[in-house]
Image (tube, helix red, strand yellow):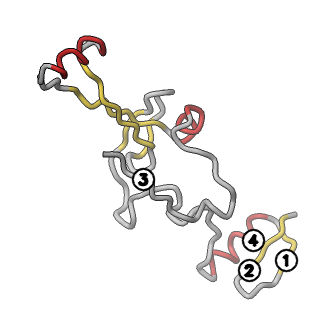
Amino acid sequence: MYLCVLAWEQVYKEDAITCYLKLERIGRLPFKRKSRGRSKGGKGSGAVVQCAGCGQIVPRDKAKRSTRRISLVDSALAKELRQKGTYIASSADTRFYCVSCAVHRGIVKVRAEKERRMRISRPRRF
């Protein structure tokens, strides 16, 4: 038996399927996050990417992206070259992770239930 709360604040004890159908009928299904875990908006399905951690196929708008700069020059040598005024090129390495791998690696933090619906803007580094 499940506890089912409807839009008009009445509580029913029913099985999960009946509860789901009643919520679907009135057009208010419960959701955990404001974006429903994706950043696609209303555009339908999008491209898929492969998780760099486990190899799982994940929708691109749901996957967590991690970008880091990779220098081709050793750090000690790069410091000397920078002092002489040399420009050192670096390449960007972008990896996509599924949600479970991103949480495991610390890319995404687990948030409290009330904080999940809020969008967090990270401070930009320049």
Residue type (three-letter) at the residue carrying disc 3: Pro
Marks 1 and 2 close (CB-CB < 8 Å): yes
Lower position in the chain sequence, tag 4 or tag 3: 4
Q: Which residue is mark 1?
A: 12
Lower position in the chain sequence, tag 1 or tag 2: 2
Q: Quadrant of residue 30?
A: bottom right
Q: Which residue is mark 2?
A: 6
Where is residue 111? Give x, y as percent. Answer: 64, 52
Quadrant of the frame with the C terminus: top left
CA separation, marks 1 and 3? 45 Å
CA separation, marks 1 and 2? 8 Å
Label 2: few (<14), some (14–19) or many (≥20) C-alpha neighbours in 10 Å: some
Task: In the displayed orientation, state which residue is furthest to the bottom.
Answer: 8
The tag on residue 123 is 3
CA separation, marks 2 and 4? 9 Å
CA separation, marks 3 and 2? 39 Å
Q: Which residue is mark 4?
A: 19
Q: Quadrant of residue 116?
A: bottom right
Label 1: few (<14), some (14–19) or many (≥20) C-alpha neighbours in 10 Å: few
- Label 1: element kind: strand
CA separation, marks 1 and 4? 8 Å
Residue type (three-letter) at the residue carrying disc 4: Cys
At horizontal 42% and vertical 53% (from top left) the residue drawn is 123
Label 4: few (<14), some (14–19) or many (≥20) C-alpha neighbours in 10 Å: some
